[in-house]
Amino acid sequence: MKIATFNINNVRRRLPNLLGWLGAAKPDIVCLQELKCTQAEFPADALQKAGYAAVWQGQKTWNGVAILARKAEPVLTRTALPGDAGDHEARYIEAAVRGIVVGCLYLPNGNPQPGPKFDTKLAWFKRLHKHAAGFIKDDLPVVLAGDYNVAPTPEDIYPTRSWDKDALIQPKSRAAFKALLDQGWCDAIRTLHPEQPMFTFWDYKRNRWPRDAGLRLDHLLLSPALAPRLKKAGVDRAVRGEDGASDHAPAWIVLT
């Protein structure tokens, strides 16, 4: 079973890119972030023709998350991360697919920091910690996949000081990610590629893609009940270099 996460950065604009990648990579489950479309605008028909059923939570202009399944029907279980009834941003969706619980997330960016947006990021992380702990306690096979907006270690960003004040690499952001791992979650990409950069994001500005000035922001975390099934993992870097590409590349894993 192949599971991928892809910050598509506007699913309608990048639909040709998405369909081309789906046809070539043939993932069984896909988590998408930054749909940037309303619920009604999501291209469900085009994806269905490509062989993928979907559940999604759209939002006008920003955010938006979706779970796609090939030759399967995702069973929707959540459309929001619990813990804050006042949070109306489309950043979390959850479904059961092929015997696995799939949580697709788009964590707040947190910039500028310090400030209210960074506080929101850390508060969202705390809610995620609580929800994730429940999966661990119940010993469920779960993947939490998405754009975490965190480069967890210095090895997850190209050599630079230009991001030093950015929310993506702050000690508190990294500590919040580590707290998830400390619950028992397996960082699938880093587990199988402990020494390679494995970047998933290259900003459009400052020629960062041609320079390979990337960050690893997109992660697939596996619960202890699922982690033993991990066999392969990677990043489809070439997708980032296509015409009209998202600024992210898909990250993926293969389970037995």
Image (cartoon, helix red, strand yellow):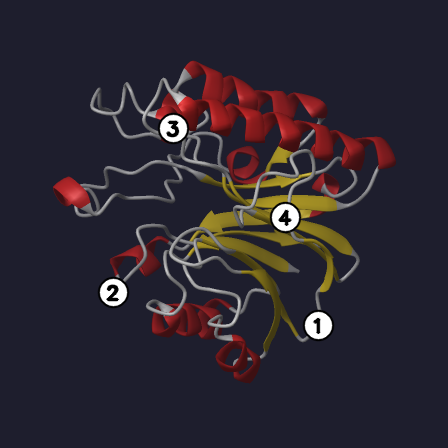
Q: Find the distance from the CA under tag 3 to the CA under tag 4.
A: 28 Å
Looking at marks 2 and 1 on the same chain, the residue that comes earlier in the sequence is marked by: 1
Which residue shows up at 32% across the image and 57% down it? 246
Q: Quadrant of residue 97?
A: bottom right
Looking at marks 3 and 2 on the same chain, the residue that comes earlier in the sequence is marked by: 3
Q: Nearer the viewer, mark 2 or mark 4?
A: 2
Query: Three-letter amino acid code at disc 2?
Result: Gly
Q: Find the distance from the CA under tag 2 to the CA under tag 4.
A: 32 Å
> Is 108 on the left or on the right of 115, as rendered?
right
Which residue shows up at 30% across the image and 56% down it? 240
Residue 168: which disc? 3
Q: Find the distance from the CA under tag 3 to the CA under tag 2.
A: 25 Å
Q: Which residue is mark 2?
A: 244
Q: Which residue is mark 1?
A: 72
> Is 140 on the left or on the right of 162, as rendered?
right
Asked if marks 2 and 4 touch (Cβ < 8 Å), the reply is: no
Q: Quadrant of the N terminus?
A: bottom right
Q: Find the distance from the CA under tag 2 to the CA under tag 1.
A: 29 Å
The one of 140 and 41 positioned closer to us in this rendering: 41
Query: Three-letter amino acid code at disc 3?
Result: Leu
The image shows residue 185, relative to residue 198, as above or below, that is above
Percent x, y for residue 28? Answer: 62, 65
Q: Which residue is mark 4?
A: 231
Q: Nearer the viewer, mark 1 or mark 4?
A: 1
Secondary structure type for disc 4: strand
Percent x, y for residue 184? Answer: 71, 27
